[in-house]
Image (cartoon, rainbow, N blue to C red):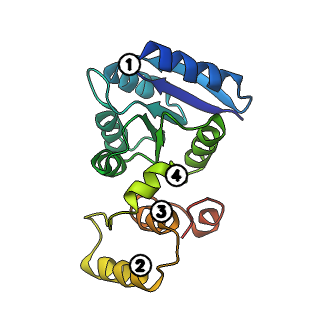
Amino acid sequence: MAVRILLADDHPLTRSGIAEFVRRESTFELVAEAEDGISAWEMIQELRPDVALLDIRMPGLDGVAVAQKVKNEGMNTAIVMLTSYDAQQYVIASLRAGARGFVLKTVSPKELTTAINTVAKGGLYLDPEVASVMGEQDFIPEQLSVREREKDSAARKSQRNFSSVKGLCRLILRRYMTSWDHATRRKHYCSP
């Protein structure tokens, strides 16, 4: 069964290029395109896509606001932020809003395919450039308990050779992917 995708970007040229790529992939089905966040939210509610590729900055509602609405409604649509911005505040805001992927618009088609497939299966995907930016600081979601933060901090200190991508994914997965069962967890790129 094809992964059903909604694409939202306010730049027509970017949107049409990504849409054409999605249409050409046999495992994907483009169910809708939106040019702003309000339309994206309305289409997500109506169509219930498996994955929504959202530009982070759009008129009406930005991608983070749309992701937050999806999360608040308890919908199963996996959000991938597709953006030109790799600043830590965008990544952190997106992940806290419920996004499961963050991909730069400079990503290769192969990487975009991997990102979509990973989040469609319940995983987390961070663009390698984004992961390296995030690896420059300790990121612990504020919702972790004091004991969990201490445990994660100690684990990071004792595993300096552990890649920053894998370490970041482990922390984020613990917070944002709590509904996974343990058998499924091992199948994804960022399994702890």
Residue 146, located in which quarter of the rendered image? bottom left
Disc with the residue nearer the chain's start (3 vs 4):
4
Residue 151 or 78: which is nearer the viewer?
151
Q: Amino acid at mark 2?
A: Arg
Pointer 3 residue: 169
Is mark 2 in CB contact (under 8 Å) with mark 3? Answer: no
Q: Amino acid at mark 1?
A: Asp
Pointer 1 residue: 10
Q: Amino acid at mark 3?
A: Cys
Pointer 2 residue: 156
Disc with the residue nearer the chain's start (4 vs 2):
4
Pointer 4 residue: 128
Residue 17, located in which quarter of the rendered image? top right
- Mark 2 vs mark 3, foreground winner is 2
Q: Where's the N terminus, which quadrant?
A: top right
At 71% from the left and 33% from the top, the residue drawn is 27
